[in-house]
Amino acid sequence: MGSKNKLKRFKENATFKNVVQPKREEIEGGSFPLKGRWNSHFGNDNPIVLELGCGKGEYTIGLAQMHPQMNFIGVDIKGARLWRGAKTALENNMGNVAFLRTQIELIDQLFEENEVTEIWITFPDPQIKYKRTKHRMTNEVFLKKYEHILIDQGVVHLKTDSEFMHGYTLGLLQGIQREVIYANHDVYKNEGSPMEVLAIQTFYEKQYLERGKPITYIKFRVN
């Protein structure tokens, strides 16, 4: 994507009513106004679901279409990517969709305790190198952040093409004694996966499937 196109999308994001772009100092200073009040953004008290590392927002959009009685927020730092999902939501008058441009590590400072019902993590970078473990989105530090913002018995969904990420997460959950509700190492060959896992495919997922890579999925609790 050319720099001019990126700049155009950044400017459009600033005009989109469904895109929230807080400054880091605002978040860390505790002055972010939507923390604990996200339902005011949607104008209802419906459950809130996050997609972390949403990219172009395919899952955020797909889930919102399947569950209009819930609110969905796609979270990503790359504004030029989430622009696509935000524009699609506006074009289709999807009032239950929003996008939040921020770093994932700040997520517990953007949502209040017990404010989120579910979290989806779709095709994250597995950060295979040991030195990158701290950036792995299912490491113990991130899981504690998710535990803080999730309601009691709230769930996390991990869908990935990385067998390493799948195995790492299962091992960690077992080690810290968290409940694994469902796990599947090849969702399109083995029966039993939820409809949301099979019915929605991201841009990158389609590429992985064309190359014959199995898609894995875990549904688990962190509290």
Image: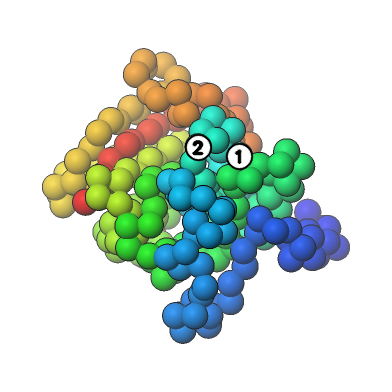
Extreme front residue here? Answer: 44
Mark seen at residue 144 = none
Q: Which residue is mark 2?
A: 69
Amino acid type of disc 2?
Gln
Relative to 202, is 27 above or below? Answer: below
**Residue 79 seen in this snapshot:** yes
Extreme right residue here? Answer: 4
Q: Quadrant of residue 219?
A: top left
Q: Residue at x 51, y 46 (%)?
A: 71
Residue 123: x and y in percent read: 49, 43
Residue 91: x and y in percent read: 76, 42
Q: Residue at x 33, y 36 (%)?
A: 218
Relative to 135, is 123 above or below? Answer: above
Amino acid type of disc 1?
Ile
Looking at the rendered structure, the secondary structure element under dot 1 is helix
Q: Nearer the viewer, residue 165 or 72?
A: 72
Q: Residue at x 41, y 70 (%)?
A: 109
The Cα atoms of the two marked residues, 2 and 1, are separated by 13 Å
- Circle 1 packing at 10 Å, graded few (<14), some (14-19), many (20+), is many
Quarter of the figure with the N terminus: bottom right
Q: Which residue is mark 1?
A: 61
Residue 105: x and y in percent read: 43, 66
Residue 43: x and y in percent read: 56, 54
Q: Nearer the viewer, residue 157 or 175?
A: 157
**Residue 6 seen in this snapshot:** no
Is disc 2 in contact with disc 1, using a CB cutoff of under 8 Å? Answer: no
